[in-house]
Image (cartoon, rainbow, N blue to C red):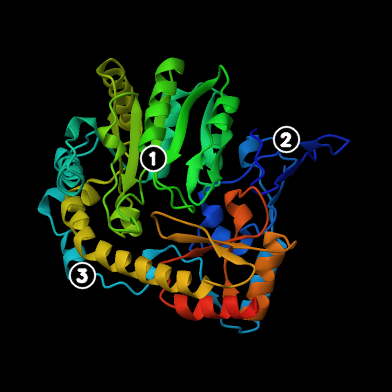
Amino acid sequence: MCFSALADVIFISECVNSHAALPWCSLGRDYLRPESRAVRRFARGATWRMVLSRCEMFSERTNWKLTPNRYTQAREEMRASGTELIDLTVSNTTECGLHYDSAAILGAFQNAKALGYEPEAKGLLAAREEVARYYREDHEETVDPESVLLTTSTSEAYSYVFRLLCNAHDEVLVPTPSYPLFDFLGDLQDVTLIRYQLHYAQGWFVDFDSVLAALTPRTRAILLVHPNNPTGSFVKSEEVARLNKLCRERGLALIVDEVFLDYSLDGAPRRTFVANRDALTFTLSGLSKIAALPQMKVAWMVTTGPETLVRPALERLEIIADTYLSLSSVTQWAFPKLFEQRKSLQPQLQDRVRENWSYLKSAVNGKAGCELLDTEGGWYAVLRVAGDRSDEDLAIEIMKNAHVLVHPGHFYEFPSDGHLVVSLIVSRFHQGISALLGLMG
């Protein structure tokens, strides 16, 4: 099992007399999803305590017993008392007061072709062509629809790539700080995740010394989030060149998460990795963020790079996808009209993010003991707070005294305490930030 400082997760064996602690490991994406029932009850403020069951029927990777932590207990107590909390962690776009064209969205499913069944491992051609059109129109990049593979989620796409590239216990390098999407997926696919650092110096940069130190003979890929969540940092062009060179020299692939690509803070488009031809590259995205339609469960993966690697990769991915055929035909036929919704929903989100960022920057300016870290994109902001309190203690204090929910920085594996993460798409953002900063004096 992989080591992670993220959740301070403790495995305790009940099957041995000594009850000795087993290796540490961390959880996956739902850990940070406020809309998830698992998160609402068990989301870790400081630790998720996981205890292995005596039952030998099931694999160790599923023998979890989750115990509510102090942060979760405090939140449940507050809500049980009737206290209204302003949630500055909301990431579910359907709960942020956006205007959705309900007629168009529901009308997308009124397609008689959905009554037939046309199993296509990569996804229906009409839907894949729509993905190619998005890159052509929105990012001025040419994508061959045959290089596109549709999935129900980026999580599923990750699992396909991990299975494609890795034997059991092979390694993939992942950035930190970043959101813990990957740990649970890695565990389920028997892939070991190794951290490399992002370094902050009035902006975030890849720490290549930590990348090189993390490499071993079992390393199969380097994972990037572009822009990263929650730091909001895009991968710089010079970093791309160094990463491509490293991948060519070591026989590695790049796995790139671009779900927030279209949300640059300054409005300037950023280059997508679908244009990368210098190393085998798997670029992941989906409707959830790009079109603010997380409930529709459509994502995609574009494979690019040297032709000698792309062709066998696609052949193998097609067999993996054909094994499951997980994406429904109904959704695929609706996809073009659903994807069209990005043209009305993205501007709403972009305006919300920029307005909230501007307000936060002004509110923090000159505030003693509180610093707003620079960001470039996505829809999160990071505050660095002076003091010797743990992230969990600070988040609980804010919850109890300001009635505001924030994410402690260690959710994302920040290297030290004193970091708070807030969502920039919250409709009551001004009120929440005012209460939070008011508590800090």
Residue 282: percent from the left, percent from the top?
A: 35, 32
Would you say residue 191 is visible in this rendering?
no
Q: Is residue 434 above or below residue 290?
A: below
Disc 3 packing (10 Å; few <14; some 14–19; many ≥20): few
In this rendering, position of residue 243 left or right of residue 6: left
Q: Earlier in the sequence, mark 2 or mark 1?
A: 2
Indicate the position of residue 414 as horizontal and vertical percent values.
61, 50
Q: CA distance from mark 1 to mark 3?
A: 36 Å
According to the picture, the residue beneath numbered tag 2 turns out to be 23
Image coordinates of residue 6 in percent, x first then y, are 64, 47
> Is residue 44 left or right of 111 when viewed as pictured?
right
Mark in the foreground, 1 or 3:
1
Residue positioned 14% across, 59% down in the render: 110
The amino acid marked with disc number 1 is Lys
Q: Earlier in the sequence, mark 1 or mark 3?
A: 3
Instruction: Count every numbered label the image shows and give the total.
Output: 3
Looking at the image, the residue that sits furthest to the front is 366
What residue is pinned by disc 1? 236
* Residue 45, position as x, y percentages in the image: 66, 59
The residue lying toward the viewer, choosing from 207 and 202, is 202
Q: Is residue 58 above or below residue 247?
A: below
Report which residue position mark 3 lands on.
101
Residue under the point 64% across and 57% down: 44
Q: Residue at x 65, y 32 (%)?
A: 1
What kind of element bears circle 3?
loop
Identify the mark nearer the N-term, 2 or 3.
2
* Residue at x 25%, y 65% (from the top left corner): 347
Nearer to me, 245 or 156:
245
